[in-house]
Image (spheres, rainbow, N blue to C red):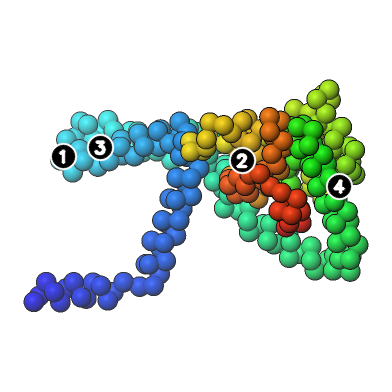
Amino acid sequence: MILLFEFEFDFLSIRLLDILDVLIVGYLIYQLYKLLRGSIAFNIFIGALLLYGFWLLVNALEMHLLTSLLGQFVSLGVIMVLIVFQPEVRRFLLLLGNTTLKQRSHFISRLIDRANTSADSQEKINNVAYLKAALLKMSKDRTGALLVFASKMDIEFFSNSGVKMNAEISQPLIESIFCRDSPLHDGAVIISDNKIFAASCILPISSNPDLPKSIGLRHRAGLGATENSNMVAFIVSEESGEISCAVDGTLSRNLGDTDLKRLLLEKYP
């Protein structure tokens, strides 16, 4: 009876903030798992957890020599994590802040640019028409292509690897960039702020181990760019002419005319 009373007392002492605390930690661990899975860093992370667990065990057993030796590694744990997982930590922080900053910038831009809504809308419709026509033409000709929509926050991480253009969007220009004889046809074209910002950009390859082997490097690059950012990629397969769209690390394949137009209108930056 006493044990039951103590259990009920402890249960009733659980606060709403305690539940929220567990949920937030669980969410952070899940996001960390998504960033590390399928990579060498994931194996290193598991090894670090095993080392920490072993240190707790020998400490509980009062094995002083092993505790002292392993404690030297554990005491430097935060510094080691920052050194070994520097790219992953950077991507994790970017993932946490990207969505909030994007929503804030969209809110501010709507307040500032409300008077120019009709003009911007018409420019968006025109640019989407150019992009759709270019993608369909390259699909028909089986010209490989990779177009990426990016916000101003995302472009700085990828555009430095390519050739900056800051050119108006047009169907002939896009087709000429991806022409097989063009020096810029390898890599991605980044579109931001109603401009072709850069071409021939190198994107990170997706580390998703569940992708089918039939997916080539162009599709993996498009997926990799969208896994940890708000970027959206449209890919034209050189082998089949199939048009695909990558959003949040998910690939939609074999897009038809209607689906392509809908996605271009929805995802245009």
Looking at the rendered structure, the kind of residue marked 1 is Glu
Q: Helix, strand, or loop for circle 3?
A: helix
Looking at the rendered structure, the kind of residue marked 3 is Phe
Q: Looking at the picture, how far across and down is residue 161, in whole percent?
A: 73, 31
Q: Which residue is mark 2?
A: 223
Q: Which residue is mark 3?
A: 54
Looking at the rendered structure, the kind of residue marked 2 is Leu
- The residue that appears at 23% across and 35% down in the rendered structure is 67
Q: If the image is split into quadrants, where does the N terminus sit?
A: bottom left
Sequence-first disc among 4 and 3: 3
Q: Which residue is mark 4?
A: 130
Can residue 201 be seen? Answer: no
Label 4 vs label 2, nearer the camera? 4
Asked where in the image residue 2 lies, by quadrant, the reply is bottom left
Give the residue furthest to the left. 1
The Cα atoms of the two marked residues, 4 and 3, are separated by 60 Å
- The residue that appears at 83% across and 66% down in the rendered structure is 112
The Cα atoms of the two marked residues, 1 and 4, are separated by 71 Å
Q: Looking at the picture, how far across and down is residue 195, in whole percent?
A: 85, 46
The Cα atoms of the two marked residues, 3 and 1, are separated by 12 Å
Asked where in the image residue 189 lies, by quadrant, the reply is top right
Can residue 208 be seen? Answer: yes
Sequence-first disc among 2 and 3: 3
Sequence-first disc among 2 and 1: 1
Sequence-first disc among 1 and 4: 1
Q: Which residue is mark 1?
A: 62
Label 2 vs label 1, nearer the camera? 2
